Amino acid sequence: MDGLTILVTNDDGIHAPGLKSLEKIARELSSDVWVVAPETEQSGASHSLTLSDPLRLRELDERRFAVEGTPTDCVLMALKKVMPKTPDLVLSGVNRGQNLSEDVTYSGTVAAAMEGTSLGVRSIALSQSYGLDGTFTLKWQTAEVHGPALVRKLYAADWGPDVLININFPDCEPDAVAGTEVTVQGRRDQGLVKLDERVDARGRTYYWIGFERIRSNPAEGTDLRAVYDGRISVTPLHADLTQNHAIATLGPLFD
């Protein structure tokens, strides 16, 4: 893979430790690595574009840039303005925390890979789970140890058109990983988002959006179950959200 050009991006920002982990992974695969990432954290940005403000680009080093915008903005800027040629591969992450089940619709990490895919570049999102073992120490080395071989194997495979790959590494040490499983997108048993109500120094109420960290009991074969059981989850995704089963029901209403 050394002849490949790889774009590295994320949603946690240009200074995020997960971006450093992803750069390590990319540089084990190729010497032609470009980094174009958000200036500040963009977690939860999903597939949003910056339309009402200008995009400002800052060059930090050779082949390393920060964009005042979303992960989607970063991929667009990289492919349309920054890089001299279209990359062979987009790697997004390594995200601080899992992107499983409903997470993928919020995730800027997944959205960056989705944008790469929509622009015709094979793209992979990578996330490192944490908090599932009761501690909140991120085990970046798990992604760093297993990532290069996994990306190399995936790149050599035929995913089909308009597909992006969503990888989630389990919350365990590298030597405790119980294998890799190709999974479907799961569904949690309870709501993901919670609102934490607080009061500021002036007595005014404000809210923080947070996430429930309660284990569900997901079905076998899902991304949730694989990561809960210590396996690396590999989920092929695509941007087509059509619910085809409902077409047969709704179609006759308008015949």
Image (cartoon, rainbow, N blue to C red):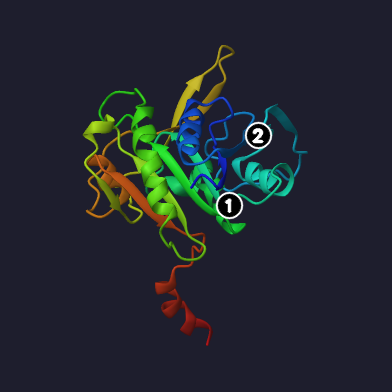
| Residue picked out by circle 2 | 63
Residue that protrudes farthest toward the front in the picture: 3
Asked if one can make out residue 192 in the rendered structure from this viewpoint, the answer is: no
Q: Nearer the viewer, residue 33 or 21?
A: 33
Q: Nearer the viewer, residue 198 or 167?
A: 167
Q: Nearer the viewer, residue 97 or 161?
A: 161
Q: Relative to 140, is 119 on the left or the right?
A: right
Three-letter amino acid code at disc 2? Arg
Q: Position of residue 183 (x, y in %)?
A: 31, 54
Crowd rating for badge 2 (residues with CA inside 10 Å; few <14, some 14–19, many 20+)? some
Distance in Å between CA atoms under marks 2 and 1 = 18 Å
Do residues under tags 2 and 1 come within 8 Å of each other at their CB atoms?
no
Q: Nearer the viewer, residue 16 or 249?
A: 16
Residue drawn at point x = 52 percent, y = 59 percent: 239
Indicate the secondary structure of the residue bearing disc 2: loop
Q: Position of residue 14 (x, y in %)?
A: 59, 29
Q: Position of residue 128 (x, y in %)?
A: 38, 35
Residue that protrudes farthest toward the bottom in the picture: 255
| Residue picked out by circle 1 | 116
In terms of image quadrants, where is residue 33? top right
Crowd rating for badge 1 (residues with CA inside 10 Å; few <14, some 14–19, many 20+)? many
In terms of image quadrants, where is residue 45? top right
Q: Position of residue 144 (x, y in %)?
A: 39, 33
Count of all numbered marks drawn on residues in the image: 2
Residue 145, numbered circle: none
Q: Nearer the viewer, mark 2 or mark 1?
A: 2
